[in-house]
């Protein structure tokens, strides 16, 4: 590898730039391939259904409305805020505000 780099230093700038482009494209391709292959493991067990089964109404494979989606999102944000407000860090010396 070092011999290749030494030979590359002696070549004209145009060839050096071309080599850098090819090397960076190969590295990017390798990273993209690893990322794509890992998708299978990350989303293999994911549930892509629209309903969570807790609403009690039949979904029939229909997409939820925009207002329903936004309402669910806001409910989740509210739950996160409430849970974070009541969270007490075990390493903290402050007393929680109630």
Image (cartoon, helix red, strand yellow):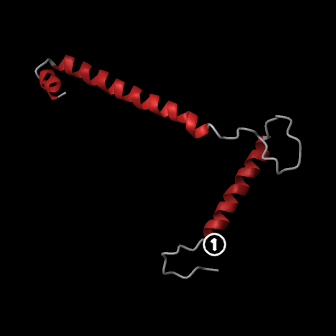
Out of 56 and 67, give the one closest to the viewer: 56
> Would you place residue 28 above or below residue 69 in this image?
above
Q: In what quadrant of the picture does the N terminus appear? A: top left
Q: Nearer the viewer, residue 29 or 14?
A: 29
Q: Is residue 49 above or below residue 78?
A: above
Residue 3 point in image, percent of width and height: 13, 25
Judge the density around disc 1: few (<14), some (14-19), many (≥20) Cα neighbours within 10 Å: few
Q: Position of residue 16 (x, y in %)?
A: 20, 21
Location of mark 1 (residue) = 86
**In the displayed structure, would residue 4 be above or below residue 57?**
above
Horizontal side of residue 9 vs 65, given as left or right: left
Residue at image location 82% in from the left, 35% down from the top? 62
**Residue 49 drawn at (x, y percent):** 75, 39
User: Quadrant of the rendered structure where residue 41 is?
Assistant: top right
Residue 50 picture location, percent across and down: 76, 40
Residue lying farthest right? 57
Element at badge 1? loop
Q: Residue at x 14, y 17 (%)?
A: 12
Q: Quadrant of residue 40?
A: top right
């Amino acid at each position: 590898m070092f011999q290749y780099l030494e030979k590359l230093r002696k070549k004209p700038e145009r060839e050096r730039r071309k080599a850098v482009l090819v090397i960076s494209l190969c590295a990017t391709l390798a990273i993209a391939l690893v990322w794509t292959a890992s998708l299978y493991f990350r989303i293999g067990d994911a549930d892509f259904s629209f309903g969570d089964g807790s609403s009690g109404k039949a979904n029939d494979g229909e997409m939820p409305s925009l207002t329903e989606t936004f309402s669910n999102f806001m409910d989740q944000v509210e739950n996160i805020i409430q849970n974070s407000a009541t969270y007490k860090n075990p390493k903290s010396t402050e007393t929680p505000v109630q």
